């Protein structure tokens, strides 16, 4: 089992979610987040004053999938979240040792 965390643009959420559902991934957690990478934010004007927006709105999607679905999930996220511009986001993958369903103590991949 592997955990996939994707930080993406909020405008790409529906496309990414649909792409993941299409390949059979139904369980995911979606969080609103704020942050920045290399772009370090930007400046805006409001009522004639300039101010810096250094923490940009993002969406974080987390899911745990079987090893056989990892590459399909990554490709689904890449193809649906990519705009080719700075700030498209990042994908992180980490190994999961175990999963436990709280309702009935089910363990392992079947608990997903």
Image (cartoon, grey):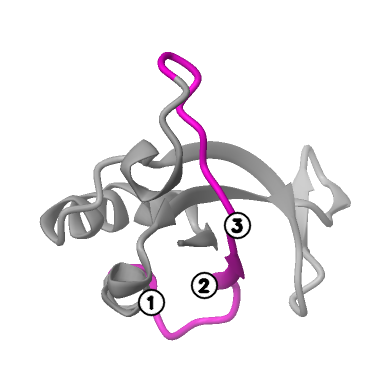
Taking depth in this image into account, of 53 and 23 the one nearest to the observer is 23
Range shown magenta: 80-104
Q: Nearer the viewer, mark 3 or mark 2?
A: 3
Say whether residue 85 is magenta. Answer: yes
At horizontal 56% and vertical 49% (from top left) the residue drawn is 98
Label drawn at residue 97: 3
Q: Is residue 67 above or below residue 106?
A: below
Q: Where residue 97 appears, x then y in whole percent?
A: 60, 57
Most common SS among magenta residues = loop
Horizontal arrangement in the rendering, residue 76 relative to residue 49 (left or right): left
Q: Residues within 10 Å of mark 2 (few under 14, many from 20)?
A: some
At horizontal 45% and vertical 50% (from top left) the residue drawn is 63
User: Dot 1 corresponds to which residue?
Assistant: 82
Q: Are marks 1 and 2 in contact (CB under 8 Å)?
A: yes
Q: Are marks 3 and 2 in contact (CB under 8 Å)?
A: no
Q: Where residue 27 appears, x then y in whole percent?
A: 33, 40
């Amino acid at each position: 089992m592997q955990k996939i965390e994707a930080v993406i643009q909020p405008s790409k959420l529906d496309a990414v979610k649909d792409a993941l559902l299409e390949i059979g991934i139904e369980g995911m957690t979606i969080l609103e987040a704020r942050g920045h990478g290399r772009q370090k934010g930007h400046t805006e004007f409001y009522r004639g004053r300039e101010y810096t927006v250094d923490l940009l709105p993002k969406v974080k999607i987390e899911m745990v999938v079987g090893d056989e679905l990892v590459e399909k999930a990554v490709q689904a996220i890449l193809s649906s979240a990519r705009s080719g511009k700075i700030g498209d986001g990042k994908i992180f993958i980490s190994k999961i040792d175990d999963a436990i369903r709280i309702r009935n103590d089910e363990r392992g991949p079947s608990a997903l």
